[in-house]
Image (cartoon, coloured by chain):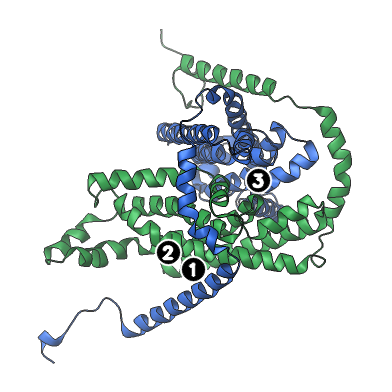
Amino acid sequence: MTKNNEDYTWQRPRLIKSKNLRYLIFSLLTAYLILTFISLRIDPQRILLGLSRSQSYFADFLRPDFFSRGSSIIDGILESLTMTYIATVFGVIISIPFAFGAAENISPKPIYYISRAVIVISRSFQEVVIAIFFVVIIGFGPMAGVLTLTFSSIGFIAKLLAEEIEDINWSQVEAIKATGASWPKLMNYAIIPQVLPRFIGLVVYRLDINFRASAVIGVVGAGGIGTTLNAAFDRYEFDSASAILIVMIAIVMLGELFSSFIRKKVNE
Amino acid sequence: MSSNDYNWQLKGISRVLKELLFWAAGIWLFIYCWNILSARTMWPFVYDGAEQASKLLFRMFPPNWPYFFELLRPIWDTITIATIGTLAAVIFSLFVAYLAAENTTPHPTLRYFALLIIVTSRSVSSLIWAIILVIILGPGVLAGIIAISFRSIGFVSKLLYESIEEIDKNQVEAVAATGASKFSTLIYSVVPQVFPTFIGTSIYRWDINIRESTVVGLVGARGIGLQLNEAILGLKWPDAIIIFMMILSLVLFSEFFSARIRKIII
């Protein structure tokens, strides 16, 4: 008996074809969600208390006060910006050798593994964790922040740049090699021109990230606007805190405009 | 001019000059910034840094292995904060991305509103959200979850709306031509096209959030950050090294896991 055409209904194709596997994955996910919700231990009374108290905080947040702490806000922003610039410069200089080391196509195996290990460690720890470490070692202040941002820039830039080097067009390298070029010349004429636009994009992007991070690591004492922000929170000066957040958002937006401008220029 | 005198140059002379100027400005700015920072630094402590660091490393050994079992609960909390935070952000991002994409937004004003949400969320880091939320909600996992999700909304929505803007219009027109309702058109023409990006972005964000959720505990939102803070403030270095190893293995696991899933889906 042939199937009647009218009985046939179309069904959306499923992502996971096997029915059993699909049900297994969904039930595991549900079980996990239930378990986590049990472990949340939400205290509704505390939340109600907080919400009623937070009304005055919100009122303060809506009235940002730029002036009563104006000088320390400017000072903090300046410190953050200087930290960001210095750390990005250091980070870039140090990450270039690691990037070349971590590119599988141009690097010998032992160097490849060492570079990858450095990248993994730098990327695994959140900036704040690294900042705590540096604050313990060299004390409070912006220099701990610079070291933190430098350290976490290395993993980021080196990883993405290494991937870019691995993707280059190898025939250009062969062509330069065929002219009898030495190793530095090979780098300069065959590899660097291919990765340069992407590299500049990465550096600008990292400047942006470092500025945002510089606002956070101040919470643990590593200098910058974060220190000012943390002080404002500690003194319950939410109007100043709100002003600091607004200034930060404005700077990040300016940074975004600047970086899209630079990237457009480079890609021309 | 004989052809022997001719040398090929990578860059023209005006370009070289421009680049030199650029480098000079960069170096001048570096020296200027360095002077500011240097004035605010206690140099004796910095000179001492390497010695202090090696002393710290020695104090971490032998690691306090039994402490591992006390960490299971904080690690569970950390994973919960990252996972539920990502989930909440992803659900919310669906709406924000729909409003923010030029080709699906119902009204241009709504689009600017959605873009404002995206920028605000991306500018303020999760730790600062956590400070604010701990004040309101009290210390606990919930503050961490909301902090992580506030931070993630911008990231997920931004990547998602960019991919909505890049979809193939013909498919939308084809489905609309069958007389499907607006909602059905969305489900059958837009969603399938952005689905891989959506899953990929969500999982990538989850991977980032695992890292972020290791620190929200520092300001009271639970998770392993709380233990880290205690260990370091209490100078319990044999405990601290266990925490560092836990964080490292958690992050490596999440990276491996997310890479696998993204490979399967995309």
The residue indicated by pointer 1 is A262
Can residue B23 be seen in the rendering of this structure? Answer: yes
Circles 3 and 2, Cβ within 8 Å, touching? The answer is no
Picture coordinates of residue B109, whole percent (x, y) = 72, 56
Chain represented in green: A
For disc 3, the chain is B
x then y, percent, for residue B247 = 51, 35
Q: Amino acid at mark 3?
A: Leu
Q: Nearer the viewer, residue A7 or B42?
A: B42
Tell me the SS state at disc 2.
helix
Q: Is residue B182 visible?
A: no
Q: Write the residue at 73% across / 60% down.
A: A244
Q: CA distance from mark 1 to mark 3?
A: 29 Å
Quadrant where the image shows the C terminus of chain A: bottom left
The residue that mark 2 highlights is A200
Residue for badge 3: B127
N-term mark: 2 or 1: 2
Q: Secondary structure at mark 3?
A: helix
